[in-house]
Amino acid sequence: MMRIGVFFGGQSREREISFSGARTFFESIDTTLFEPVPIFVDSHGNFILLDERFLKETDIRSFYPPKTTTEGVLKGFNIYVESIKVLTDEQLSLMASKIGHLIRPTDFKKYFDFGFILLHGPYGEDGSLQGLLEWYNIPYSGSGILGSAMGIDKYIQKQFLTMMSLDPGRHKAILKKDYLRSDKKLLFESLKKDVGFPFVVKAPYQGSSIGVSIVKQDDLEVFKRSMNKALFSVSIAKDMWQGLNQQEKEQYVRDLIDLDKGIGLPVIFSDESLLAGDLGEVICYRPYELIQKLDDYFSYAEQSATLTSFDSEELVLFEAFLKGKEFSCGVIQDEHGKPVALPPTEIISHTAEGFDYNAKYKPGGSSKKIPIGISVKHIEEIQAICRRAFVDFKYNVCVRIDGFFTEDNKIVLIDTNTVPGMSPTSLIFRQAAEIGLNATQFLTYIIRTSLAERVKTGKKPYHLLAQLRNLDVRIQNMAERNRLKPKSAIIMTGFNKDKNSILETARRIYTNLCTSRDLQPIVLLMSDSQMTELYTLPISYLLKPTLSDVIDALKQPLHPAIAETIEKASNITQKYAPDFNPLPQQVTYFHLQGKIKAVYLVGETKAPSVEKLKALLQNDHTLCKEYML
């Protein structure tokens, strides 16, 4: 069995998103093929073989640094380990021993055969970890070193799009050092002329829309705040700080050091006044240290305090604000290495700042529509451009390309994610579901395809080919076993369209059963109270946003763009999901009789039709579990 080292956490601002993806991976991976090994990467870049029970924690700060090592110092603050100023080897080993144990890259092969990279942003998505794994001859998931380096840099992508005669949109960039000594008003005016107004301000090496804002007001102060956000800097006015009580100061700093709200710790305090003989920059590592510094500073200074993240950006990117439909299009490779563009998803933001961090990850921040609501011809144009970018940028295996279809029918690519997010209903999982792959099958696809791509590098190819042949045999044997597995049915009784917890519960049960060695799950929906409308559902329906969307789509024809994508991906689907049917099929209970070993009823289990179904199951001696919501 292939051992999969799952790398997550990391040094970037997206470490919590990475942690969420790791939980999904462990819930979804096929343990008949693979043995997952959790490799937690802390924010100093250390590798810790994690005790798997810590994957159940809500976030990284809940377990690391361990509370026993920070008691009496932080007084109620949750921090990341970079807030501990100096760590000796002994201290680091002690901390790691509370959650697992430290491992060195030289020992990686003792623990795993393949690295699955779930690190986002710098140090994980930029070629750094990919290069480290190649040095130690360990195959890994996703794009190689070159494609990863290209994918992380939004600015260089625009230069290459121009060389490819593709539209990168109007844009401009400025170095941090040049901005700091610039005339801010003149810069603002030149940007409005060169890029257009409104315009977008971005931190070009971050993902998840971190450090992104839209300047919509013709106001110099608004522009400066957007620049601070992109540079992970903040200006604190004296009257604001001194107007807070101690509890409010603590909450302000708590928000400030939260990576999805603020700039994090440690911070550089730019002190341009004389204080106790010190002049210049002071680094604050801990929350109370920062509070004390601000109190001391405002006891004599009148000007605002400037705090800048220790990991600030050195370049800021400006883009024209685009009007139209925002999309995200996954691109994967078929069995012959040919790129296949999945159906592009339309992103409909419900926040004033567009598809920012909150829109991506906070409930109700955005909604998604597959495929994007434009003509089939234009959908095909998006897919063709994304396939071309995949090839020309030297991407591999699986990427997600974001862009805009503008009001004047232009296609503008704005960013690539070479390590797409992997939450349970993430964009890439939903798009893969349109060609029939559930999360378990898609992870198997990524591992197998990545291994085939690593063979092409010519580094120890004999060893990699042996791994690939062995895995192919195991996948084929698994497909045979799955055909012989008894089926378990998840039946949603969705009479009340508002009970979306029905859909969430059905997804959770389905994911658990997909990794089962004993049962193969199928999903059904009973959409009326008379048990006359019972439908088997493809996986794409289970990943729709709401139960209402599922019911509304039951009798809709297959979208032509999705039908065409399914055809182009047929050799992928046939290998990993041979029983895939893209449309719901209406059945009766008698179609299922004798074929189902277990039934999971989810929803309104006391309705007369459901009671009738339970009686039939009991007569057939079928195991039945109820999830009444």
Image (cartoon, rainbow, N blue to C red):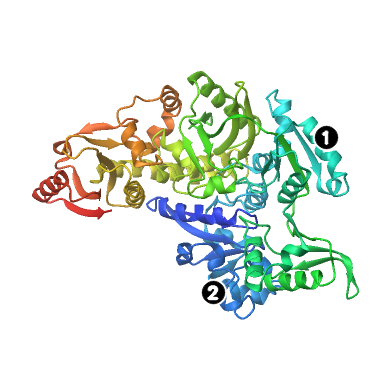
* Marking on residue 98: 2
Residue that appears at 69% across and 29% down: 168
Count numbered badges in the picture: 2
Whether residue 538 is visible to the viewer of this picture, yes or no, is no
**Circles 1, 2 touching at the beta carbon (< 8 Å):** no
Q: Give the answer, above or below, for where 381 lies relative to 551.
A: above
Please give left or right for residue 361 compared with residue 320 in the image.
left
Residue at the top extreme, as displayed: 377
Tag 2 secondary structure? loop
Residue at the bottom extreme, as displayed: 72
* Marking on residue 190: 1
**Is 159 in front, or is 440?**
159
Residue 13, percent from left and from top: 64, 55
Mark 1 and mark 2 lie on one chain; the one further toward the N terminus is 2
**Is 6 in front, or is 421?**
421
Residue that appears at 53% across and 70% down: 99
Q: Give the answer, above or below, for where 121 lies relative to 350.
A: below
Give the residue type that dot 1 points to: Ser
Give the residue type that dot 2 points to: Lys
Task: Count neighbours of disc 2 (C-alpha within 10 A) and say few if under 14, some if 14 to 19, many if 20 or more.
Answer: some
Residue 200, percent from left and from top: 69, 38
**Is 199 in front, or is 383?**
199
Tag 1 secondary structure? helix
Residue 572, percent from left and from top: 43, 33
Residue that appears at 42% across and 25% down: 567
Residue 478 sits in which quadrant?
Answer: top left
Q: Give the answer, above or below, for where 132 lies relative to 529.
A: below
